[in-house]
Amino acid sequence: SVPVAVGDTNVIAEDGVNTVSGSVLTNDTVGADTNATPITAASPTLTYGSLVLNSDGSYTYTLDNTNAAVNALNDGETLTDSYTYTLTDGDGTSTTATLTITINGHTDG
C-alpha cells in the first residue's frame, strides 16, 4: 500500500505557553514499505512562529509573541500558521499533507 498523509491541526494561545508539540504521523499511514524516518525533517520559520519537524514525525511549534500581528490579537480572533510536510515510505513513494496551527487571541491589558 502507498503512504497516506492526512492534514493535522493544533492550537496555541497568544500570551500563553509559547510552544505546542505533537506528531504529524498520528493520523497518517506509512504504507507497506516501512521507513524508520518517514518524514522529511525541516526547521522553517513560518509567518507567526517557527517549527521544528523531526524525521520521526514529532514537532514543536514556537509562537513569536513579539510579532505585531500576534500581539494585536484580541479575544475571539485567530491567525493560522501552516507547513506542508512530506511523508515517504521505504521504496520512495511520497505524499504530502499540511500541519495547521491556529493561534487564539487574547485581549491585552
Image (tube, rainbow, N blue to C red):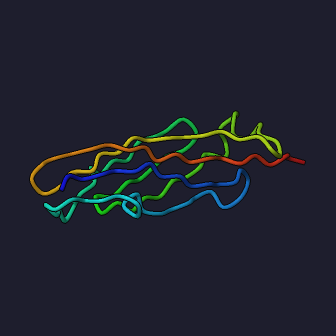
Question: For the point 38% across and 47% down, which residue is it?
Answer: 43
Vertical side of 30 occupied by 83: above or below: above
Residue 9: x percent and y percent?
Answer: 53, 52
Q: Is residue 102 left or right of residue 22?
A: right
Question: For the point 12% across and 48% down, which residue is it?
Answer: 92
Question: For the point 52% across and 45% down, which residue is it?
Answer: 100
Residue 91: x percent and y percent?
Answer: 9, 53
Q: How many marks?
A: 0
Furthest-left residue in this view: 91
Residue 44: x percent and y percent?
Answer: 40, 42
Q: Is residue 85 left or right of residue 104?
A: left
Furthest-right residue in this view: 109
Q: Quadrant of the N terminus?
A: bottom left
Foreground residue, 79 or 108? 79
Vertical side of 34 occupied by 97: above or below: above
Residue 16: x percent and y percent?
Answer: 71, 58
Question: For the point 21% across and 45% down, which residue is it?
Answer: 94
Foreground residue, 12 or 1? 1
| Res 27 quadrant in image | bottom left
Q: Is residue 90 left or right of residue 7?
A: left
Foreground residue, 68 or 7? 7
